[in-house]
Image: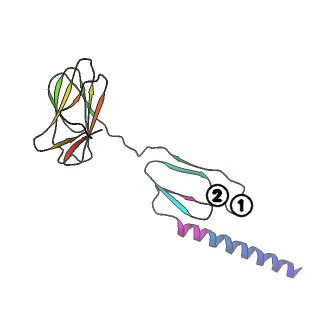
Amino acid sequence: MRARSQLCLFVAAVLLTGLSIAAVAKKANSRADENVAVILGQAGEQYPIYGVGGIKVSGGHHGMWSSNMKSSGIQIDGSGVSAQKFMPVNVNTDFSAAPNGAYFVSNSAVCILSTAVGAAGQEIVVCNTTRNATITYQTVPGEILLVGDQSGPVVNSSPGKVDRFISDGKGWYRE
């Protein structure tokens, strides 16, 4: 009887030690960054996913106690994603377009794109809102407007067509 009690205590101690080691290993492997989820592959490889906003990982514990759970899910709610907001402007004459502006043009006009220097990564959006109107695009002296292989003046004469210009800090590129 005493041998059986000692055996039970020994087995309990081994199990407790094993669980403690697993908990310590899991704690040591955790990241300080709360905006990360790690996906474990079948061969033990790790795929970290970083993000802002809410990242929620559900299921996925394939350990000793939950080995029958085979489904996992990752949800990113996008609360930390911010979209660029444009300032809308209605235009019916020649105008100068500034970065982060959305211009809705209702008559033929010349659009002078502001300097691209200091505006790297920023955009200008121009929409032709009416029939029989042509928007002609120009840059400030010394800067370029790249539009693929188009030669001659850059224009938009299609009603409803939106032109999007993106700066690289030296010139404007039309999408």
Q: Quadrant of the C terminus?
A: top left
The residue where tag 1 is placed is: 65
The quarter of the displayed image where residue 166 is located? top left
The answer to whether 21 appears left or right of 170 in the picture is right
Q: Secondary structure at mark 1?
A: loop
Quarter holding the N terminus is bottom right
Residue at x-position 68% and y-position 75%: 17
Q: Residues within 10 Å of mark 2 (few under 14, many from 20)?
A: some
Q: The residue under label 2 is which amino acid type?
A: His
The quarter holding residue 98 reads top left
> Which residue is labeled 2 in the image?
61
Q: Is residue 157 above or below residue 73?
A: above
The amino acid pointed to by label 1 is: Trp
Q: What residue is shown at x 52% (from left), y 64% (from top)?
A: 30
Give percent across and percent down for residue 9. Answer: 78, 77
Pick whichever, 121 or 24, lies toward us.
121
Numbered range of the magenta stretch: 23-44
- Quadrant hosting residue 87: top left
Measured as percent of width and height from the top left, residue 85 is found at: 31, 37
**Mark identifier at residue 136:** none
Spot the residue most to the right: 1
Residue at the image position 21 percent from the left and 49 percent from the top: 169
* Marks 2 and 1 close (CB-CB < 8 Å): yes
Q: CA distance from mark 2 to mark 1?
A: 9 Å
